[in-house]
Each structure stands twice: as C-alpha cells, then as structure tokens.
C-alpha cells in the first residue's frame, strides 16, 4: 500500500473538502492508504467512511496568512502541517499533500523533510495546461528567488525524469524562459544558464522561450529562477481570470451574446476544465527526501482528490528514487 499523509486542516475550505477528497481517492484508487492530520473532533463530523483512512490528532493549524512561517513550523511541531511533514522523515508516509500556507509548507519541507542528498536547491513545479492538450512543467515557481545556474541543471534534470515517468514523454525538451529566443538574450545569469544547458547531456535543451508562448511552448519543461517563473505563473493566472470576466461580460451584455453562450455552453465548459488547476492536483516540490504536493489553497474535494492521485502516481512511478539514484553516482554530494 502507498501511504499518503494529508494535512486536513490547511486551506481555505479545510477540513471538509480535504476529507471529502480523501474519501473520493480511497474509492477510486485501490492501492493507497490515507493518514489525515488534524483536529479529530472536527474531522469526525465529515468523515463518513473511514475505509483505509486513519486520523492522527493535531489540534494546531498554521494560518494561511502566517507572517513568520519558519518560526511557526519550529514552534508548532504539533500542527497538522508539521506533523504530516515529519511523518515523511519517520517513514510513516510515502508522500504528503497539503493546501496550507505556501511559505509555511516550503519552510516545513526544508526543516522537517529536508533535501535528498546531493540536491542543492529544491524547486516548486506547477503544471500548466497546453493549447493543444497535455501539460507543461514550470519551475521554479517561487522556492528560490536567486539561484546558481548549476543548481538549475539539477532541477531541469528532475523535471525531465518527472515528464518521462508521469507524462510518458520519451525525450522531454527543456526551454529557458527569456525575453527573446536568440542566443545571448537576457541577463548575464540567463546567458550563463543558456550555455550550461547547451553543453549538458542530461537532457535535450531547446533554447530560449519567450513568456508569450507559455501556454503553447515548443518544449515540455519551462525553467527560470524562482522570481521570474513565479511572475510568469501569476501573470498566466491573472490573464486567464481577466479574460474569463471579459468573456462573461460580453456574453451577457445582450440577447445575441446570451444565445451564443447557450450554443457554446459545452465548449465553454471544456475550456473551464482545461484551465482548472483542480484537474492537475498541485505543484510538486522537487528535490526533497520524499514527495510533497502543494495543492491550491482554494482546492475543493475534486482538486484535493487529484492531489492525492498525483502523489500516489509520483510514488508509484519512482520519480524521486530515479533522481536519487542518479545523484549517488555523482561526486561532491555534500549539502549546503
């Protein structure tokens, strides 16, 4: 059995949606067992089927707007998030899913789970939808605001293994987010990364990719430093929300728009599904000792089910083990 730890109290709609998502996952996935971390008294109100679900009592909840996430993790080892993360180092779970405060989860992952030996910097890797179907891995979406080019080489390799194992892409291509496609574009940092990627045999490097192609890229993986990639991700999210509001405004402005919306209802529904983060599950934190999945704070039950499904697939496919095996063959494995 694959054991998945769930922070049942983290998120905008916790613990109801987390518990409903966990029960949905148990019904749909045969080879998992779920450990829910949270207030047992509150969880019992929503847990109507405890088949392969255990509850570990954790009374404290790290708030979504926590100002000092590192201090919160260190001070509240009895919180649902901290207890779930600690379970990975204790080998009580194979992966953890949480929709709690992002910075607290990142801090907790580094303090309580820690990086796999030899991996220099972790990366948050959300999955973006593609215009023609399928998915694109984006990293790093905020774990490292500044980073060394050689550390990005590890992150890109991790993304390659993830794409191969999870998306069944034989030879995934890596693209560097930049302000232009020509060689020599960007900051000195970007140019260093470009030349390093061009010379590596760890993965196939496509070259520079402009942000305007992020939903229809010529590659399978898009990478940059955490500051740049986070801006790209949030810009896409904002653009999608803005366009949705504009579309709704025009479709409801007159009778012809309403008629068009009625005729295109199925297509509009499919578009909403394609752009929904709940269809994916969450963003994996690359480079940890074991998988941690960051689900959206506003995840409902279906989104949380997909986060659990995603975590189980990562474990089942041996993504982290493959990278760990590679790192063991390299010299200088000392962590910084």
Image (cartoon, grey):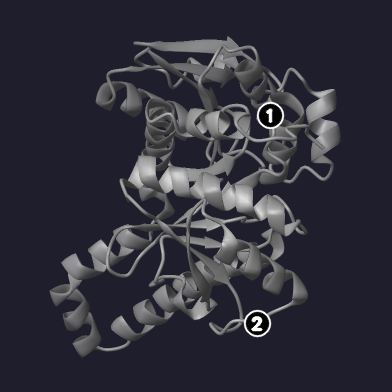
Q: Position of residue 210 (x, y in %)?
A: 53, 79
Q: Which of the 4 image quarters holds residue 273?
A: bottom left
Q: Is 256 above or below relative to 272?
A: below
Which residue is more in the foreground, 157 or 244?
Answer: 157
Observer able to see residue 97: no
Q: Position of residue 319 (x, y in %)?
A: 46, 34
Q: Position of residue 274 (x, y in %)?
A: 32, 60
Which residue is more in the foreground, 262 or 163?
Answer: 163
Observer able to see residue 201: yes
Q: Position of residue 183 (x, y in %)?
A: 59, 81
Res 184 label: 2
Q: How far apart are the alpha carbons under marks 2 and 1?
A: 33 Å
Secondary structure found at label 1:
loop
User: In the figure, is residue 275 to the left or right of 117?
Assistant: left
Secondary structure found at label 2:
loop
Res 85 label: none
Quarter of the image that includes the N terminus = top left
Quarter of the image that includes the C terminus = top right
Q: Residue at x 61, y 22 (%)?
A: 84
User: In the figure, is residue 192 to the left or right of 38?
Assistant: right
Q: Residue at x 37, y 57 (%)?
A: 135
Give the residue pinned by disc 1. Answer: 117
Q: Is 244 above or below relative to 278?
A: below
Q: Residue at x 32, y 51 (%)?
A: 169
Q: Is 216 above or below relative to 293?
A: below
Q: Is 45 above or below relative to 269?
A: above
User: In the figure, is residue 35 to the left or right of 30?
Assistant: right
């Amino acid at each position: 059995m694959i054991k998945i730890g769930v922070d049942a109290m983290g998120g905008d709609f916790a613990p109801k949606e987390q518990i409903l998502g966990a029960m949905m996952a148990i019904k749909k996935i045969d080879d998992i067992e779920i450990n829910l971390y949270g207030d047992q008294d509150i969880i019992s109100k929503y847990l109507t089927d405890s088949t392969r679900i255990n509850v570990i009592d954790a009374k404290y909840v790290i708030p979504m707007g926590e100002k000092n996430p590192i201090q919160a993790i260190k001070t509240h080892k009895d919180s649902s998030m901290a207890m779930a993360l600690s379970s990975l180092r204790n080998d009580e779970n194979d992966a953890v899913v949480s929709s709690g405060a992002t910075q607290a989860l990142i801090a907790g992952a580094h303090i309580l789970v820690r990086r796999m030996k030899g991996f220099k910097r972790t990366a948050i890797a959300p999955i973006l939808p593609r215009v023609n179907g399928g998915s694109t891995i984006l990293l790093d979406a905020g774990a490292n605001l500044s980073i060394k080019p050689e550390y990005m080489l590890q992150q890109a390799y991790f993304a390659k293994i993830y794409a191969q194992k999870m998306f069944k892409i034989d030879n995934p291509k890596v693209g560097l987010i930049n302000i232009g496609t020509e060689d020599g574009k960007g900051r000195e940092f970007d140019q260093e990364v470009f030349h390093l990627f061009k010379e590596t045999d760890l993965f196939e490097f496509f070259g520079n990719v402009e942000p305007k192609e992020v939903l229809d890229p010529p590659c399978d993986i898009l990478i940059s430093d955490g500051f740049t990639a986070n801006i790209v991700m949030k810009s896409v999210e904002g653009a999608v929300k803005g366009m949705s509001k504009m579309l709704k405004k025009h479709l409801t402005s007159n009778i012809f728009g309403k008629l068009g919306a009625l005729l295109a209802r199925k297509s509009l529904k499919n578009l909403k599904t394609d752009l929904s983060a709940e269809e994916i599950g969450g963003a994996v934190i690359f480079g940890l000792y074991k998988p941690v999945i960051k689900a959206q704070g506003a995840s409902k039950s279906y989104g949380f089910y997909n986060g659990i499904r995603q975590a189980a697939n990562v474990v089942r496919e041996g993504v982290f083990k493959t990278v760990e095996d590679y790192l063991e063959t390299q010299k200088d494995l000392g962590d910084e």
